[in-house]
Image (cartoon, grey):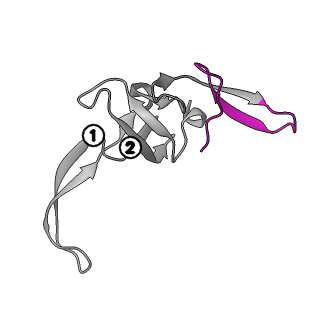
Amino acid sequence: MAARIKKGDKVVVLAGKDKGKTGDVVRVLPADNRVIVRGINISRRHQRQTPSQQAGIVAKEMPVDLSNVAVADPSDGKPTKVGFRFNKDGAKERFSRRTGELIDG
């Protein structure tokens, strides 16, 4: 499942407090079946002071379960399933199952 969503993909949140929002995948955690999405599932954490960072309350993106996100269709931004196929050169490519368009990423 983790191979279907990659770093840099634009995804739509399907469930939870941020349902309907879109964002870019910052990091994929395949061992935990989770992803970190920019601007989604923001939590406020108390940060201890370090030599390079000031102390205070910091907004941090927390992981979201893979089952709660779907890749956004390149044409209209709606959630879609990801399919795989081989092009004429024999290279594997990802495509949107809704429209058949290629997913870059």
Residue 43 at x, y percent in the picture? 21, 46
Q: Nearer the viewer, residue 54 or 99?
A: 99
Task: Read off the residue under disc 2.
Answer: 37
Residue 7 at x, y percent in the picture? 52, 47
- Residue type at mark 2 is Val
Determine the residue located farthest toward the bottom in the rendered image. Answer: 51
Report helix, strand or loop for mark 2.
strand
Residue 105 at x, y percent in the picture? 59, 44
For residue 5: magenta?
A: no
Labels 1 & 2 near each other (Cβ < 8 A): yes
Report helix, strand or loop for mark 1.
loop
- Residue type at mark 1 is Asn
Image quarter hosting the N terminus: top right
Left or right, residue 57 beside residue 25: left
In this rendering, the answer to whether 49 lies above or below 13 is below
What residue sits 27% from the left and 32% below the top? Answer: 18
Q: Nearer the viewer, residue 70 or 32?
A: 70
Highlighted range, magenta: 86-105
In this rendering, the answer to whether 99 lies above or below 40 is above
- The secondary structure making up most of the magenta span is loop
Q: Residues within 10 Å of mark 2 (few under 14, many from 20)?
A: many
Q: CA distance from mark 1 to mark 2?
A: 8 Å
In this rendering, the answer to whether 71 lies above or below 60 is above
Determine the residue located farthest toward the front in the rendered image. Answer: 75
What residue sits 75% from the left and 27% below the top? Answer: 85
Residue 27 at x, y percent in the picture? 46, 48
Label disc, if present, on residue 41 of the rendered structure:
1
In this rendering, the answer to whether 65 lies above or below 55 is above
